[in-house]
Amino acid sequence: MDLRYSRMNEWSDEDQLFQARLPEWGPYAVTHGYSYQGAATRGQEVLEMLVQSALADGKPLPEPQVVRASA
């Protein structure tokens, strides 16, 4: 599934693990993993579930955020 949504992977000192945040889906769209790759994989899985759930419920998908790299 080609999903063009943001996924921010970061270390959490508080939780002592990596978090994957899905900002377009709101502040509670967060999952985690004990490794960077684990968080990235779980983030992709959660993103796919959120999209499938929204489509099944007939809800609109959020607009993907545009991220621009600074020069």
Image (cartoon, rainbow, N blue to C red):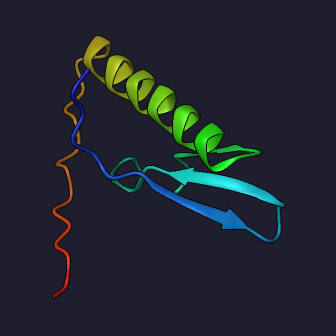
Residue 62 x, y percent position in the rendering: 23, 44
- Can you say which quadrant of the picture contains the C terminus? bottom left
Residue ranking furthest to the top: 56
Name the quadrant containing residue 47.
Answer: top left
- 38 or 27: nearer the eye? 38
Horizontally, residue 39 falls left or right of residue 66, namely right
Residue 67 x, y percent position in the rendering: 20, 67
Horizontally, residue 66 falls left or right of residue 10, namely left
Name the quadrant containing residue 17.
Answer: bottom right
Residue 68 x, y percent position in the rendering: 16, 72
Name the quadrant containing residue 32.
Answer: top right
Say which residue appears at 53% left-offset and 42% top-offset: 40
Say which residue appears at 44% left-offset and 22% top-offset: 49
Say which residue appears at 32% left-offset and 26% top-offset: 51
Residue 1 x, y percent position in the rendering: 26, 20
- 70 or 6: nearer the eye? 70
